[in-house]
Image (cartoon, rainbow, N blue to C red):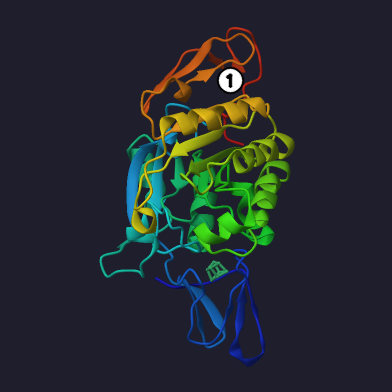
Amino acid sequence: MEREAILYEKLPGGKVRCNICQWHCLINPGKSGVCRMYINRDGTLYSMNYAEVSSLAIDPIEKKPLFHFFPGTNAFSLGTWGCNFHCQNCQNWEISCVDIPDTSQRLLPGKEIELAKKYNCAGIAWTYNEPSIWFEYTLDSARLAKENGLYTAYITNGYITPEALDTIGPYLDAWRVDVKGFNDGFYHQLTKIPHWRGILDMAKRAKDKWDMHIEVVTNVVPTMNDDEKQLSGIASWIRDNLGELTPWHVTRFYPMRNLSHLMPTPISTLEIAYQIGKKAGLKFVYLGNVPGHEYENTICYSCGKLVVQRVGYNTEVLGLDKSRCKFCGSELNFRTKSR
Ligand code: SF4
Protein backbone atom coordinates (compact mmCIF):
# COMPACT_ATOMS: atom_id res chain seq x y z
CA MET A 1 0.00 0.00 0.00
CA GLU A 2 1.11 3.55 -0.57
CA ARG A 3 1.90 6.30 1.94
CA GLU A 4 3.35 9.72 1.28
CA ALA A 5 7.05 9.72 2.07
CA ILE A 6 8.15 11.90 4.95
CA LEU A 7 11.65 12.93 3.90
CA TYR A 8 11.75 14.52 0.47
CA GLU A 9 11.86 17.85 -1.30
CA LYS A 10 9.55 19.09 -4.03
CA LEU A 11 11.52 20.57 -6.93
CA PRO A 12 10.61 22.56 -10.04
CA GLY A 13 9.06 20.63 -12.91
CA GLY A 14 7.30 18.15 -10.64
CA LYS A 15 10.59 16.47 -9.71
CA VAL A 16 11.34 15.34 -6.17
CA ARG A 17 14.50 14.59 -4.19
CA CYS A 18 14.25 11.59 -1.84
CA ASN A 19 16.18 12.13 1.38
CA ILE A 20 15.90 8.74 3.01
CA CYS A 21 19.12 7.17 1.86
CA GLN A 22 22.41 8.58 0.66
CA TRP A 23 21.58 8.02 -3.00
CA HIS A 24 19.40 11.17 -2.63
CA CYS A 25 17.54 10.08 -5.76
CA LEU A 26 16.30 12.87 -8.02
CA ILE A 27 13.03 11.41 -9.30
CA ASN A 28 11.03 12.60 -12.29
CA PRO A 29 7.21 12.41 -12.33
CA GLY A 30 6.06 8.84 -12.86
CA LYS A 31 9.48 7.39 -12.01
CA SER A 32 10.89 5.65 -8.97
CA GLY A 33 14.23 5.78 -7.14
CA VAL A 34 17.11 3.32 -7.20
CA CYS A 35 15.34 1.11 -4.64
CA ARG A 36 12.16 1.07 -6.80
CA MET A 37 10.08 1.46 -3.63
CA TYR A 38 9.61 5.23 -3.74
CA ILE A 39 7.65 6.69 -6.64
CA ASN A 40 6.98 10.25 -7.75
CA ARG A 41 3.28 10.68 -8.53
CA ASP A 42 2.64 14.18 -9.89
CA GLY A 43 5.26 15.81 -7.69
CA THR A 44 4.49 13.87 -4.50
CA LEU A 45 6.77 11.07 -3.32
CA TYR A 46 5.13 7.87 -2.09
CA SER A 47 6.46 4.83 -0.31
CA MET A 48 4.96 1.92 -2.26
CA ASN A 49 5.80 -0.86 0.16
CA TYR A 50 4.29 0.52 3.35
CA ALA A 51 3.41 -2.58 5.46
CA GLU A 52 4.24 -4.90 2.53
CA VAL A 53 6.02 -7.88 4.03
CA SER A 54 8.13 -10.30 1.98
CA SER A 55 9.44 -12.36 4.89
CA LEU A 56 8.42 -12.87 8.46
CA ALA A 57 10.03 -15.17 11.04
CA ILE A 58 10.74 -15.66 14.69
CA ASP A 59 14.52 -15.69 14.74
CA PRO A 60 17.08 -15.99 17.50
CA ILE A 61 18.65 -12.54 17.81
CA GLU A 62 22.00 -14.28 17.27
CA LYS A 63 20.95 -14.96 13.67
CA LYS A 64 21.09 -11.24 12.79
CA PRO A 65 23.92 -11.57 14.02
CA LEU A 66 23.62 -9.59 17.24
CA PHE A 67 25.66 -11.34 19.93
CA HIS A 68 25.80 -8.68 22.68
CA PHE A 69 22.16 -7.64 22.50
CA PHE A 70 19.55 -9.46 24.59
CA PRO A 71 21.37 -12.80 24.15
CA GLY A 72 19.20 -15.89 23.88
CA THR A 73 16.02 -13.96 22.98
CA ASN A 74 13.87 -14.20 19.87
CA ALA A 75 13.25 -11.26 17.55
CA PHE A 76 10.12 -10.93 15.47
CA SER A 77 11.82 -10.41 12.11
CA LEU A 78 10.37 -8.63 9.11
CA GLY A 79 11.59 -7.83 5.63
CA THR A 80 10.03 -6.09 2.66
CA TRP A 81 10.71 -5.99 -1.10
CA GLY A 82 13.53 -4.27 -2.99
CA CYS A 83 16.80 -2.70 -1.84
CA ASN A 84 18.91 0.38 -2.39
CA PHE A 85 22.03 -1.76 -2.91
CA HIS A 86 22.50 -4.41 -5.56
CA CYS A 87 25.20 -6.50 -3.95
CA GLN A 88 26.77 -9.19 -6.05
CA ASN A 89 26.82 -11.51 -3.04
CA CYS A 90 23.25 -10.85 -1.87
CA GLN A 91 21.86 -13.92 -0.13
CA ASN A 92 18.30 -12.59 -0.25
CA TRP A 93 18.09 -11.60 -3.90
CA GLU A 94 14.66 -13.24 -4.29
CA ILE A 95 13.22 -10.41 -2.18
CA SER A 96 15.76 -7.63 -2.72
CA CYS A 97 15.93 -7.59 -6.52
CA VAL A 98 12.21 -7.68 -7.32
CA ASP A 99 9.16 -5.42 -7.44
CA ILE A 100 6.28 -5.97 -5.02
CA PRO A 101 4.51 -9.16 -6.15
CA ASP A 102 0.76 -9.78 -5.93
CA THR A 103 1.47 -12.37 -3.24
CA SER A 104 2.90 -9.78 -0.82
CA GLN A 105 1.42 -9.96 2.69
CA ARG A 106 0.23 -6.79 4.39
CA LEU A 107 0.96 -6.36 8.09
CA LEU A 108 -0.30 -3.05 9.41
CA PRO A 109 1.54 -1.45 12.35
CA GLY A 110 0.20 -2.96 15.55
CA LYS A 111 -0.29 -6.42 14.10
CA GLU A 112 3.45 -7.16 14.27
CA ILE A 113 3.46 -6.08 17.93
CA GLU A 114 0.55 -8.41 18.65
CA LEU A 115 2.31 -11.30 16.91
CA ALA A 116 5.67 -10.55 18.57
CA LYS A 117 4.03 -10.74 21.98
CA LYS A 118 1.98 -13.80 21.08
CA TYR A 119 5.16 -15.67 20.11
CA ASN A 120 7.18 -14.46 23.11
CA CYS A 121 9.59 -12.31 21.13
CA ALA A 122 11.54 -9.73 23.12
CA GLY A 123 11.69 -7.32 20.21
CA ILE A 124 11.37 -6.52 16.53
CA ALA A 125 14.11 -6.64 13.90
CA TRP A 126 13.78 -5.19 10.40
CA THR A 127 16.05 -7.42 8.42
CA TYR A 128 16.55 -9.59 5.30
CA ASN A 129 16.74 -6.50 3.09
CA GLU A 130 17.47 -2.84 3.80
CA PRO A 131 15.02 -1.45 6.41
CA SER A 132 15.29 2.18 5.32
CA ILE A 133 13.56 1.41 2.01
CA TRP A 134 10.27 1.06 3.92
CA PHE A 135 11.26 3.82 6.25
CA GLU A 136 7.78 5.14 7.11
CA TYR A 137 6.58 1.68 8.08
CA THR A 138 9.62 0.88 10.24
CA LEU A 139 9.26 4.27 11.94
CA ASP A 140 5.60 3.71 12.81
CA SER A 141 6.35 0.19 13.89
CA ALA A 142 9.40 1.15 15.99
CA ARG A 143 7.38 3.78 17.85
CA LEU A 144 4.74 1.20 18.70
CA ALA A 145 7.35 -1.38 19.69
CA LYS A 146 8.89 1.03 22.19
CA GLU A 147 5.46 1.88 23.62
CA ASN A 148 4.95 -1.83 24.13
CA GLY A 149 8.28 -2.52 25.84
CA LEU A 150 9.86 -4.37 22.91
CA TYR A 151 13.42 -3.81 21.69
CA THR A 152 14.03 -2.61 18.15
CA ALA A 153 16.88 -3.43 15.77
CA TYR A 154 17.80 -2.26 12.27
CA ILE A 155 19.84 -4.82 10.33
CA THR A 156 21.17 -2.40 7.79
CA ASN A 157 23.63 -1.59 5.04
CA GLY A 158 23.98 1.74 6.84
CA TYR A 159 23.43 3.98 3.79
CA ILE A 160 20.75 6.06 5.50
CA THR A 161 20.83 9.88 5.57
CA PRO A 162 21.51 11.78 8.81
CA GLU A 163 17.96 13.20 8.76
CA ALA A 164 16.40 9.74 8.42
CA LEU A 165 18.65 8.36 11.15
CA ASP A 166 17.75 11.26 13.43
CA THR A 167 14.05 10.70 12.75
CA ILE A 168 14.07 7.04 13.77
CA GLY A 169 16.97 7.31 16.23
CA PRO A 170 14.80 7.84 19.33
CA TYR A 171 13.02 4.53 18.69
CA LEU A 172 15.90 2.21 17.76
CA ASP A 173 17.97 0.19 20.23
CA ALA A 174 20.38 -1.57 17.88
CA TRP A 175 22.20 -0.76 14.65
CA ARG A 176 23.63 -3.93 13.12
CA VAL A 177 25.56 -2.57 10.20
CA ASP A 178 27.55 -4.10 7.38
CA VAL A 179 30.96 -2.64 6.69
CA LYS A 180 31.53 -4.66 3.57
CA GLY A 181 35.05 -3.56 2.74
CA PHE A 182 37.43 -0.68 3.11
CA ASN A 183 38.25 0.79 -0.25
CA ASP A 184 36.38 2.73 -2.91
CA GLY A 185 36.94 0.25 -5.72
CA PHE A 186 35.67 -2.75 -3.78
CA TYR A 187 32.58 -1.03 -2.38
CA HIS A 188 31.64 0.27 -5.79
CA GLN A 189 32.23 -3.06 -7.48
CA LEU A 190 30.16 -4.97 -4.91
CA THR A 191 27.31 -2.54 -4.22
CA LYS A 192 27.42 0.15 -6.96
CA ILE A 193 27.12 2.96 -4.40
CA PRO A 194 29.25 6.07 -4.94
CA HIS A 195 30.13 7.22 -1.38
CA TRP A 196 30.54 4.31 1.01
CA ARG A 197 32.26 6.30 3.76
CA GLY A 198 28.90 7.84 4.66
CA ILE A 199 28.06 4.41 6.10
CA LEU A 200 30.83 4.83 8.66
CA ASP A 201 29.59 8.31 9.59
CA MET A 202 26.08 7.00 10.22
CA ALA A 203 27.30 4.11 12.39
CA LYS A 204 29.21 6.58 14.53
CA ARG A 205 26.22 8.89 14.69
CA ALA A 206 23.93 6.00 15.72
CA LYS A 207 26.26 5.35 18.62
CA ASP A 208 27.25 8.87 19.66
CA LYS A 209 24.00 10.71 19.11
CA TRP A 210 21.44 7.97 19.74
CA ASP A 211 23.27 5.61 22.09
CA MET A 212 22.36 2.61 19.95
CA HIS A 213 24.06 -0.70 20.49
CA ILE A 214 26.29 -1.28 17.44
CA GLU A 215 27.62 -4.50 15.95
CA VAL A 216 29.48 -4.69 12.65
CA VAL A 217 29.47 -7.48 10.06
CA THR A 218 31.94 -8.07 7.26
CA ASN A 219 31.18 -10.89 4.85
CA VAL A 220 34.67 -11.96 3.80
CA VAL A 221 34.65 -12.67 0.05
CA PRO A 222 37.70 -14.48 -1.35
CA THR A 223 39.88 -12.27 -3.61
CA MET A 224 37.64 -9.24 -3.05
CA ASN A 225 37.93 -8.03 0.55
CA ASP A 226 40.03 -10.71 2.22
CA ASP A 227 43.29 -8.74 2.06
CA GLU A 228 44.97 -7.62 5.24
CA LYS A 229 44.76 -3.97 4.29
CA GLN A 230 40.97 -3.88 4.09
CA LEU A 231 40.38 -6.12 7.10
CA SER A 232 42.78 -4.22 9.33
CA GLY A 233 41.30 -0.95 8.00
CA ILE A 234 37.83 -2.03 9.16
CA ALA A 235 39.09 -3.30 12.52
CA SER A 236 41.06 -0.13 13.24
CA TRP A 237 38.15 2.05 12.20
CA ILE A 238 35.82 0.19 14.59
CA ARG A 239 38.32 0.49 17.44
CA ASP A 240 38.88 4.22 16.89
CA ASN A 241 35.28 5.24 16.22
CA LEU A 242 32.94 2.76 17.89
CA GLY A 243 35.25 1.48 20.61
CA GLU A 244 37.25 -1.65 21.28
CA LEU A 245 34.25 -3.38 22.91
CA THR A 246 32.20 -3.26 19.68
CA PRO A 247 31.57 -6.78 18.34
CA TRP A 248 32.91 -7.44 14.83
CA HIS A 249 31.53 -10.47 12.96
CA VAL A 250 33.61 -11.84 10.10
CA THR A 251 31.30 -14.15 8.20
CA ARG A 252 31.79 -16.88 5.67
CA PHE A 253 30.82 -16.19 2.07
CA TYR A 254 29.08 -18.89 0.04
CA PRO A 255 29.11 -18.66 -3.76
CA MET A 256 25.91 -17.30 -5.27
CA ARG A 257 24.44 -15.15 -7.96
CA ASN A 258 27.07 -13.05 -9.74
CA LEU A 259 29.82 -14.45 -7.54
CA SER A 260 29.08 -18.13 -8.04
CA HIS A 261 32.53 -18.60 -9.59
CA LEU A 262 34.25 -17.89 -6.27
CA MET A 263 34.91 -20.52 -3.61
CA PRO A 264 33.46 -20.38 -0.09
CA THR A 265 35.68 -18.46 2.30
CA PRO A 266 38.26 -20.87 3.74
CA ILE A 267 37.93 -21.15 7.54
CA SER A 268 41.64 -20.30 7.75
CA THR A 269 40.96 -16.92 6.09
CA LEU A 270 38.29 -16.15 8.70
CA GLU A 271 40.71 -17.15 11.44
CA ILE A 272 43.25 -14.73 9.99
CA ALA A 273 40.57 -12.01 9.97
CA TYR A 274 39.89 -12.86 13.63
CA GLN A 275 43.58 -12.41 14.45
CA ILE A 276 43.66 -9.11 12.54
CA GLY A 277 40.74 -7.87 14.63
CA LYS A 278 42.37 -8.97 17.87
CA LYS A 279 45.69 -7.42 16.86
CA ALA A 280 43.90 -4.13 16.19
CA GLY A 281 42.67 -4.25 19.79
CA LEU A 282 39.07 -5.41 19.32
CA LYS A 283 37.94 -7.42 22.31
CA PHE A 284 35.12 -9.30 20.56
CA VAL A 285 35.66 -10.76 17.12
CA TYR A 286 33.33 -13.56 16.01
CA LEU A 287 33.25 -16.00 13.14
CA GLY A 288 29.92 -16.29 11.33
CA ASN A 289 28.38 -19.03 9.17
CA VAL A 290 30.73 -21.56 10.77
CA PRO A 291 28.48 -23.35 13.29
CA GLY A 292 30.34 -24.94 16.17
CA HIS A 293 33.53 -22.91 15.79
CA GLU A 294 35.02 -21.85 19.12
CA TYR A 295 35.15 -18.23 17.91
CA GLU A 296 31.35 -18.05 18.18
CA ASN A 297 31.70 -17.89 21.97
CA THR A 298 32.15 -14.83 24.14
CA ILE A 299 35.21 -15.08 26.35
CA CYS A 300 35.91 -12.39 28.92
CA TYR A 301 39.00 -10.53 27.68
CA SER A 302 40.04 -9.88 31.26
CA CYS A 303 39.68 -13.16 33.18
CA GLY A 304 39.45 -15.55 30.20
CA LYS A 305 36.24 -17.24 31.39
CA LEU A 306 33.51 -18.42 29.03
CA VAL A 307 30.67 -15.90 29.36
CA VAL A 308 28.30 -16.87 26.55
CA GLN A 309 28.45 -20.22 24.81
CA ARG A 310 27.06 -20.46 21.29
CA VAL A 311 26.72 -23.42 19.00
CA GLY A 312 24.98 -22.23 15.89
CA TYR A 313 21.85 -20.53 17.24
CA ASN A 314 21.87 -22.31 20.59
CA THR A 315 22.94 -19.75 23.13
CA GLU A 316 23.73 -20.29 26.76
CA VAL A 317 24.47 -17.31 28.96
CA LEU A 318 26.92 -18.56 31.59
CA GLY A 319 28.62 -15.56 33.11
CA LEU A 320 26.86 -12.26 32.60
CA ASP A 321 25.82 -9.76 35.22
CA LYS A 322 23.89 -7.21 33.12
CA SER A 323 26.62 -5.85 30.81
CA ARG A 324 29.52 -7.13 32.91
CA CYS A 325 31.44 -10.35 33.39
CA LYS A 326 29.94 -12.19 36.35
CA PHE A 327 33.34 -13.60 37.30
CA CYS A 328 35.58 -10.53 37.32
CA GLY A 329 33.27 -7.53 36.81
CA SER A 330 34.79 -6.32 33.53
CA GLU A 331 32.55 -4.31 31.22
CA LEU A 332 31.65 -6.47 28.20
CA ASN A 333 29.27 -4.16 26.33
CA PHE A 334 26.13 -6.29 26.52
CA ARG A 335 22.77 -4.58 26.12
CA THR A 336 20.12 -6.38 28.15
CA LYS A 337 17.75 -3.49 28.85
CA SER A 338 15.89 -1.27 26.37
CA ARG A 339 16.53 2.45 26.46
S1 SF4 B 1 15.34 5.23 -0.38
FE1 SF4 B 1 17.30 5.65 -1.36
S2 SF4 B 1 17.32 4.42 -3.23
FE2 SF4 B 1 15.18 4.59 -2.53
S3 SF4 B 1 14.35 6.39 -3.59
FE3 SF4 B 1 15.07 7.10 -1.60
S4 SF4 B 1 17.17 7.80 -2.01
FE4 SF4 B 1 16.59 6.50 -3.75
Please identify the quadrant where the N terminus is shown.
bottom left
Task: Report the residue marked by disc 1.
Answer: 322
Residue for point 68% across, 26% down:
281
Q: What x and y, as percent, mark residue 299?
A: 54, 16
Asked where in the image residue 241 lies, by quadrant, the reply is: top right
Q: What x and y, as percent, mark residue 147?
A: 53, 45
Q: Compared to 262, does 19 lie above or below?
A: below
Residue for point 69% across, 45% down:
204
Q: Residue furthest left?
A: 103
Q: What x and y, as percent, mark residue 232?
A: 64, 37
Q: Mark 1: which secondary structure?
A: loop
**Relative to 290, 199 lies left or right:** right
Nearest the viewer among 136 and 17 is 17
Residue for point 41% across, 51% down:
128
**Camera sees residue 336:** no
**Camera sees residue 137:** yes
Which quadrant of the render holds ligand 1? bottom right
Q: CB at mark 1 closer than 8 A to ligand 1?
A: no
Going by the numbered disc 1, the residue's amino acid type is Lys
Nearest the viewer among 153 and 186 is 186
Q: What x and y, as percent, mark residue 339?
A: 62, 36
**Relative to 305, 114 lies left or right:** left
How many numbered marks are there? 1
**Relative to 131, 232 lies left or right:** right
